[in-house]
Image: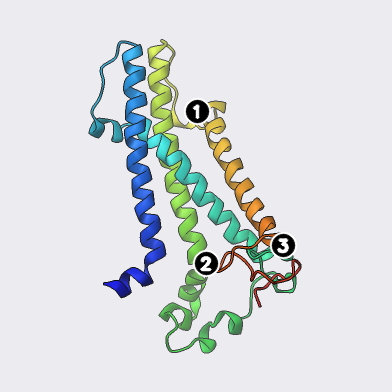
Amino acid sequence: MRAFLRDNGLALFFLGIFLASLVGQSFAGLRVHNEEAAEHGGTPVSWLRYVSSSDFGQAVMENWQSEFLQFAVFILATVWLVQRGSAESKAPEEAGLESDQQERIGGYAGGASPAWARVRGWRTALYSHSLLLAMVLIFLGAWGAQSVTAWTIYKDDQRDHGAPPVSWGAYVLKADFWEKTLQNWQSEFLAVGTMAVFTVYLRERGSPESKPVGAPHDATTSN
């Protein structure tokens, strides 16, 4: 058990604080929801009712989709774009797709390499981009869920004000939807860009996200 906890400490740590944050958000959101309902003469709802509502789903999915978009864009951008001296970048001369030997594909794969790295063909091609594909699929799923939950809330507001309902397609073209979406995207892109530049000049001893403390600022690799 101790070996399992040690070997999976990073994943377990973030899973724990993710769940704690999600639960905390649900109770804080429930309180806000019920306070607003009381101000308008509405009826308070239970915690279970709230976490299954579009209000909670929209708040959660709005953040999830931007996070996974950030990772997808960063993964793809770092294949071709570099930032000299950054711990988040390859060296300038290594930009682009690497050779089969560098990637340990096909005949260059070792005995412990994943099976799909050895077989070549479509399976190796798919596995070669599986990280990006996973991030894109999760992003699209979260974005779709955000759009539907936000649309549901928007329709309820329209109905309360006597306005005609709008379709999902019409809603995702409205400024209301994109204002919510882009305010998350811009913060994620700012954070990633800042990290790429900060790791050129700043250090955190022992972290794989940092170069060695004594590494020159213009040294892109950690060697």
Q: Residue at x 52, y 89 (%)?
A: 107
Task: Judge from the rendering whether residue 88 lies leftward or rightward of residue 46; answer left or right.
Answer: right
The residue labelled by disc 1 is: 170
Q: Nearer the viewer, mark 3 or mark 1?
A: 3
The answer to whether residue 122 of the structure is visible from this angle is yes
Percent x, y of residue 44: 26, 21
Q: Position of residue 215 (x, y in %)?
A: 70, 72
Callout 2 touching callout 3 (CB < 8 Å): no
Residue at 38 percent across and 13 percent down: it is: 160
| Depicted 47 relative to depicted 5: above or below | above
Looking at the rendering, in which quadrant would you find the N terminus? bottom left
Type of amino acid under label 2: His
Residue 129 numbered tag:
2
Count residues near mark 1 (Cα–Cα under 10 Å), then give few for <14, some for 14-19, many for 20+: few
Q: Is residue 215 left or right of residue 30?
A: right
Give the CA distance from mark 2 to mark 3. 22 Å
The residues tagged by marks 3 and 1 sit, at their Cα atoms, a distance apart of 40 Å
- The vertical placement of 220 against 146, above or below, is below
What residue sits right under mark 3 in the picture?
A: 83
Which image quarter is the C terminus in? bottom right
Give, as a three-letter code, the residue at label 3.
Gln
- Between discs 1 and 2, the one toward the N terminus: 2
Quarter holding residue 46: top left
**Residue 151 percent across, percent down from the top left:** 43, 29
Q: 10 Å neighbourhood of mark 3: few (<14), some, or many (≥20)?
A: some
Determine the secondary structure under disc 1.
helix
Q: Amino acid at mark 1?
A: Ala
Work out how far the residue at label 1 is from the one at label 2, CA to CA, in angstroms: 33 Å
Q: Secondary structure at mark 3?
A: loop
Colour style of the rendered protein structure:
rainbow
Residue 10 or residue 178, whichever sits in front: 10
- Seen from the viewer's position, the closer of residues 119 and 142 is 142
